[in-house]
Image (cartoon, rainbow, N blue to C red):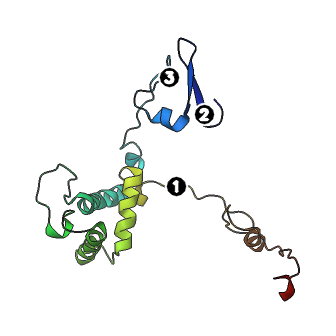
Amino acid sequence: MSGQDIRLVGPDGGGETVLAGYLFADPGFAVIGADPPAAVPQWGLFETAPAAAREKALAWQRHVREVECGLPGGPGSEGVVREQYDPARHTLAVREQAKAEELTAIGFGRVSRTTVQRMRLDYRSRACGGSSTTARPAPPVPPGGPTNELSPPSVKHCAAGVAVPRAPSTASSL
């Protein structure tokens, strides 16, 4: 193994180099002699969340599914797709807006399309739960305040309260 490259050697001594991502993504890949990885139960973390957070997540789940596939029970479930959530007739943005208006009307509070979109993306990235069921620890804040690792040095200096050294410039140097 070298970086992302993994060299595989066959029984005849011949070999091939593959990227680690491709190798691990292949469903036929296994490490000989190793125990298969244990599957993480989807609801394992969900059950550890406070009851109010679980109720909120489950309340959102059917709405997210309806926006994505047209049916509150998810793809393949029984029922009739309501016109405003029909993926064959409306874009995802239009369905998100319709859901925001519906949720506001039934008493979820003031719900925007952005809120529906955020919840939908949370569900997709966390396999059910959204932001209400899983707590992500906040990253530590550096002494000068938050900065982006890709920030230019001048921004990092300002955030740390340090003067930025500058080269003298004049109109003639342009």
Residue drawn 40% across the image and 58% down it: 122
Task: Report the mark closest to the observer, 1 or 3.
Answer: 3
Residue drawn 21% across the image and 51% down it: 75
Does label 1 or label 2 sit earlier along the sequence? 2
Instruction: Work out whether residue 50 can be spotted.
Output: no
Does label 1 or label 3 sit earlier along the sequence? 3
Q: Residue furthest right?
A: 168
Asked whether the beta carbons under mark 2 and mark 3 sit within 8 Å of each other, the answer is: no
Q: Which mark is residue 136?
A: 1
Residue drawn 43% across the image and 32% down it: 26
Q: Which mark is residue 18?
A: none
Task: Report the mark closest to the observer, 2 or 3.
Answer: 2
Please tell me whether residue 22 is drawn above or below residue 51 in the rendered image: above
Q: Residues within 10 Å of mark 1 (few under 14, many from 20)?
A: few
How far from the left and from the top, in percent, is residue 134?
A: 45, 53
Q: Residues within 10 Å of mark 2 (few under 14, many from 20)?
A: some
Please tell me whether residue 113 is drawn above or below residue 119 in the rendered image: below
Please tell me whether residue 88 is drawn above or below residue 18 in the rendered image: below
Label 1: element kind: loop
Residue drawn 22% across the image and 62% down it: 87
Q: Quadrant of the C terminus?
A: bottom right
Residue with the mark numbered 2: 5
Task: Report the mark closest to the observer, 1 or 2.
Answer: 2
Label 2: element kind: strand
Residue sitting nearer the eye, 76 or 47: 76
Amino acid type, mark 1: Arg
Residue with the mark numbered 3: 31
Please tell me whether residue 139 is drawn above or below residue 25 in the rendered image: below
Amino acid type, mark 2: Asp
How far from the left and from the top, in percent, is residue 109?
A: 32, 76
Label 3: element kind: loop
